[in-house]
Amino acid sequence: MPTPSMEDYIELIYNLIDKKGYARVSDIADSLEVHPSSVTKMVQKLDKDGYLNYEKYRGFVLTENGKQIGERLVFRHELLEQFLEIIGVDKDKIYHDVEGIEHHLSWNSIDRIGVLVNYFNNDPSRIDELKKLGRMTK
């Protein structure tokens, strides 16, 4: 199982490849605000652990395992954003909050949050009711 730091890299690489068709060390370094040498070290570790295939000076691609994990990490991130939005967290706080909690929740908790998000999304009036409750408690 990847560490939280490895998850951040896999998720970012997955998103970059999905959006641009490729991921470069410089793109990752800029996004994570780290030195390119740190990215190279992590990419080598991800290669060693079977999450991506890396060829020096040629780039890298996610393995099937890396793609599956990347997809699940993106799902987790998006699900948590939806959940925080449903419960009324200010939009400008959501991304930062998700980054802070996503590595600390079990997949069981993520699955339960998914059930709750689906419950609210299946009937938008439920979200309205929740918003009313939130206003009453302030």
Image (spheres, grey):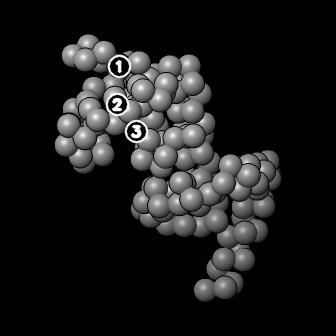
Task: Give the mark nearer the N terminus: 2 vs 3.
Answer: 3
Residue 82, percent across and down?
61, 52
Say which amino acid is labelled 1: Tyr
Q: Is residue 14 visible?
A: no
Q: Does 16 appear above or below 77?
A: above
Say which amino acid is labelled 3: Tyr
Q: Which mark is residue 43?
A: 2
Residue 101, percent across and down?
53, 60
Q: Is residue 64 visible?
A: yes
The residues tagged by marks 1 and 2 sit, at their Cα atoms, a distance apart of: 7 Å
Q: Which mark is residue 54?
A: 1
Task: Name the mark nearer the viewer: 2 or 3.
Answer: 2
Mark 3: secondary structure: helix
Q: Does 39 appear above or below 22?
A: below
Q: Camera-side residue: 125 or 63? A: 63
| Contact (Cβ within 8 Å) of mark 2 with mark 3 | yes
Quarter of the image where one finds residue 54: top left
Question: Looking at the rendering, in which quadrant would you find the N terminus?
Answer: top right
Say which amino acid is labelled 2: Val
Quarter of the image where one finds residue 42: top left
Question: Looking at the rendering, in which quadrant would you find the C terminus?
Answer: bottom right
Task: Give the mark nearer the N terminus: 3 vs 1.
Answer: 3
In the picture of the structure, the residue carrying the numbered disc 3 is: 9
Q: Camera-side residue: 83 or 42? A: 42
Q: Does 61 appear above or below 66?
A: above
| Contact (Cβ within 8 Å) of mark 1 with mark 2 | yes
Q: Residue at x 38, y 33 (%)?
A: 45
Q: Which mark is residue 21?
A: none
| Contact (Cβ within 8 Å) of mark 3 with mark 1 | no
- How would you rate the neighbour count of disc 2 (Cα within 10 Å): few for under 14, some for 14-19, many for 20 or more? many
Task: Name the mark nearer the viewer: 3 or 1.
Answer: 1
